[in-house]
Image (spheres, rainbow, N blue to C red):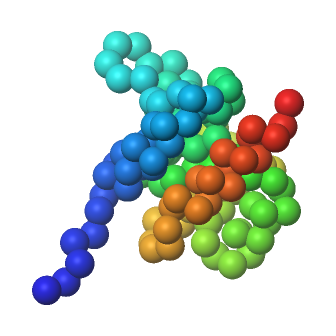
Amino acid sequence: MGKTQLSPEERFAALVDEFAPDPDVTPPAVGGRRPFGASALKARGKVFAMLSGGRLTLKLPAERVAALVASDAGERFDPRHNGRQMREWVCLAPGYMGEWLPLAREARAFVGATR
């Protein structure tokens, strides 16, 4: 039997569950009005991972983002879709089949280290 592929929403929900024990991480808001960042994982109020257009989007050091882009694992995040890409944000490619958790942990550590 083949392995069932999880949807991006299911994969993100698994990340939320993984970070639930971390007291410094705030899970996505549910229900009601949802301002920017409401559907994201945050460390001490700073977004480090979110689902955007069905793609995992992470805040990582610029060099790490460049390496992921160069390896075709993702592309720079362009939140306004106007060509102004964010240097420290990457959207994983739709076909990226690697584990999300290690990258999310990198993002969590990066955001937790920045002040």
Vertical placement of 18 versus 95: above or below?
A: above
- Does residue 72 appear to the left or right of 113 in the view shown? left
**In-front residue for pair 76/24:** 24
For image coordinates 64% across by 76% down, the residue present is 72
For image coordinates 62% across by 53% down, the residue present is 105
Vertical placement of 47 versus 4: above or below?
A: above
For image coordinates 45% across by 30% down, the residue present is 28
Q: Quadrant of the N terminus?
A: bottom left
**In-front residue for pair 89/19:** 19
Q: Position of residue 54 (x, y in %)?
A: 42, 51
Q: Position of residue 46 (x, y in %)?
A: 68, 30
User: In the displayed image of the protein, which residue is found farthest to the bottom?
Assistant: 1
Residue 67: quadrant of the picture: bottom right
Residue 68: quadrant of the picture: bottom right
Q: Position of residue 111 (x, y in %)?
A: 74, 40
User: In the displayed image of the protein, which residue is found farthest to the left?
Assistant: 1
Q: Quadrant of the C terminus?
A: top right
Residue 22: quadrant of the picture: top right
- Does residue 98 appear to the left or right of 63 in the view shown? left
Q: Position of residue 113 (x, y in %)?
A: 81, 41
For image coordinates 74% across by 52% down, the residue present is 60
Q: Is residue 77 shown to the viewer in this render?
A: no
Q: How many marks?
A: 0
Vertical placement of 76 versus 71: above or below?
A: above
Q: Is residue 14 shown to the viewer in this render?
A: yes
